[in-house]
Image (cartoon, coloured by chain):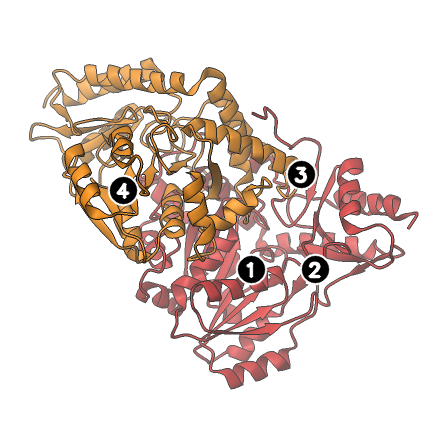
Chain colours: A orange, B red
């Protein structure tokens, strides 16, 4: 058995897990309590309030012990079935994940396919919606594989007044970009512990408007573990149907208090400042920002001159500087990599990444 | 927001989460690393080896970021479908969970229903198996709701030489009771982080024999998040298809090294000693051990005289002594409660529970 884990002397600039502040980390060393108690139910009800303030909803929220993909699957399989017809925005890995979920669960769907980094043309979206009789729209606020941020507020305006359920994967956007669930007319918001919340991975969340929750309560179970109807029922008394990741819940309680103490807008502004500083510092380097409309969560960069391949650059940043950035999967693997701005990072950290890139790309 | 969580001054005698030793807890305060690296893949491959030694298999193992129920669902939905016919042993809450999973996923099934705490008569099981043409058997090694331990070794002998896939939920039994996956002819073993492994909840595991893995690889996806075929594929290179609970993985690496350093048999023997001491100390108290064949993991106790109800006793143990034991759900709620022996507990801890029970039940 490995006695040691690969943790030391690295700083994370990836879309998750991200750097965690010391106070939050230290809570990870606590003994998790038993969760089937009134005290833990009260603690959980407080957490629900904090989560709802985070996304800006007066609706309901449930907590899954699982990754963000599970929360996406819970939303799709608990809210839609073969009688529905949904429109999916597919601009990369996570848009395709929504498509795959529709396929696996037999939800009829149409896809708007976007090239990597391209924005969603709102006239195209409006034309599709008005001609399509869709009961749902599935979109990633931030397509994490390309750094593209879609205009959820504008999409909500297009759908306003309709019966169409707007489902938004805000996993890698929340606390990096502005987000207003109720104000923008979003019905379902999916998010996770290890992105803007800067907690360890293991918890994911689904916030639901009253009409989305009504659908989830009415549909029969497609799965046991991902059936939101059961979670909504138990959430009323501050519980979850299955054993929750109690340790991360303790960290979540602390973190929500800390976030709301400074304010969500301030957290977003700080992340935006790191992203802006980083992008301004790229001038003169053979790197192009990939997306037309980038999220503050990360910057996806394309190497604009032949030479060093992206996987080599990613490895050298790690080996020589202890700077961990994210590689891309195919088809962008050779030319694209991503530098994250989420989590407990400072302006100094951003400058270090820029300096390292300058050094490594000096000869390019 | 709650600033504090319900953690202080309690000791856990529940089936999970359990008491975690200090060295393992302290690793929970570390910064989780990025998992899409070669270093983390190597770390994960070592963990797979440690997990396989734990259950005693030369087969394969996958890790889910989820509770034990999700691992049960992954096994049922990835290995069986409408062409199968499975036999389920239902002696309580977790046996019924297997029944529910068969219902939700359309797996034809027959049920052996056992009264709370009753052992499985092996002649009944053999008669069912030999007359039933079952392609699978689903059983909880330890039915956690009643404390009953079924004889998995004997069940394996009945099935030996057949094509029937034996699926064992060993979640609350592993590291409390002896377990030999390959020797006993078990095809699938389901277990979790927060029981005998004494880690925080958030990770669950499925170990598979080669024929069970072949089934999981061949069946089409019923879900995305719980499809074992995808996990088996990514496990070959030490990865998981979706973001894993990296923080708990670090603790798991440490814990597996510690368990194998002293030996699985020693951990089991220590838990057995705590269970035996506790049960011997019950003499003279108005409490009866519920199951005919109890697991070492916990003791389910029935109040044998009218008077104090079980929920009141559970609350007084917590309020007056900081001793957290587990209540039961209906229909056993009023008369039954459970005292756990899993985790970082000592003989002194066991004596404290006995002394507290003596005090509270003195007037009964």
Residue at x-position 35% and y-position 39%? B35
Read off the chain for label 3.
Answer: A
User: Disc 1 versus disc 3: distance between alpha carbons?
Assistant: 29 Å
Please give the residue where the numbered disc 3 appears in the rendered image. Answer: A38
Q: Which residue is mark 1?
A: B170
Q: Nearer the viewer, mark 4 or mark 2?
A: 2
For discs 1 and 4, the disc positioned in front in the rendered view: 4
Q: Which residue is mark 2?
A: B331
> Badge 2, how many Cα within 10 Å: few under 14, some, many 20+?
few
Q: How many angstroms separate mark 4 from mark 3 (CA)?
A: 38 Å
- Secondary structure found at label 4: helix
Question: Where is A78 relative to B117, above or below?
Answer: above
Instruction: Tell whether label 3 touches label 1 (CB within 8 Å).
Output: no
Residue lying at 58% horizontally and 54% vertically, measured from the top left: B264
Q: Which residue is mark 4?
A: A94
Say whether residue B313 is left or right of residue A208. right
């Amino acid at each position: 058995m490995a006695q040691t884990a690969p943790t030391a002397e690295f700083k994370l600039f990836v879309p998750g897990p991200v750097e965690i502040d010391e106070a939050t980390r230290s809570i990870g060393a606590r003994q998790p309590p038993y969760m089937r108690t009134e005290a833990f139910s009260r603690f959980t009800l407080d957490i629900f309030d904090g989560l709802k303030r985070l996304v800006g909803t007066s609706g309901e929220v449930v907590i899954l012990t699982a990754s963000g993909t599970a929360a996406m699957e819970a939303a799709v399989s608990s809210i839609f079935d073969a009688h529905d017809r949904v429109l999916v925005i597919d601009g990369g890995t996570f848009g395709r994940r929504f498509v795959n979920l529709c396929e696996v669960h037999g939800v009829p769907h149409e896809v708007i396919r976007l090239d990597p980094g391209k924005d969603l043309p709102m006239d195209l979206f409006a034309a599709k919606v008005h001609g399509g009789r869709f009961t749902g729209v599935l979109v990633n606020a931030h397509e994490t594989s390309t750094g593209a941020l879609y205009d959820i507020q504008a999409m909500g305006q297009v759908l306003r007044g309709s019966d169409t359920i707007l489902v938004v994967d805000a996993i890698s956007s929340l606390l990096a970009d502005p987000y207003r669930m109720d104000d923008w007319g979003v019905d379902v918001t999916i998010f996770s512990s290890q992105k803007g919340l800067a907690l360890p991975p293991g918890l994911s969340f689904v916030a639901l408007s009253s009409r989305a929750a009504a659908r989830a309560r009415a549909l029969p179970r497609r799965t046991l573990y991902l059936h939101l109807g059961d979670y909504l029922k138990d959430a009323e008394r501050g519980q979850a149907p299955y054993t929750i990741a109690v340790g991360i819940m303790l960290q979540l309680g602390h973190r929500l208090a800390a976030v709301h103490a400074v304010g969500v807008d301030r957290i977003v502004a700080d992340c935006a400042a790191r992203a802006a500083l980083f992008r301004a510092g790229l001038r003169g380097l053979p790197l192009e920002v990939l997306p037309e409309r980038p999220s503050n969560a990360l910057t996806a960069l394309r190497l604009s001159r032949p030479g060093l391949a992206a996987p080599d650059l990613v490895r050298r940043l790690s080996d020589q500087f202890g700077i961990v950035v994210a590689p891309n999967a195919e088809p962008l693997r050779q030319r694209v990599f991503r530098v994250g701005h989420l989590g407990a990072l400072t302006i100094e950290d951003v400058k270090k990444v820029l300096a390292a890139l300058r050094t490594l790309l000096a000869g390019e």
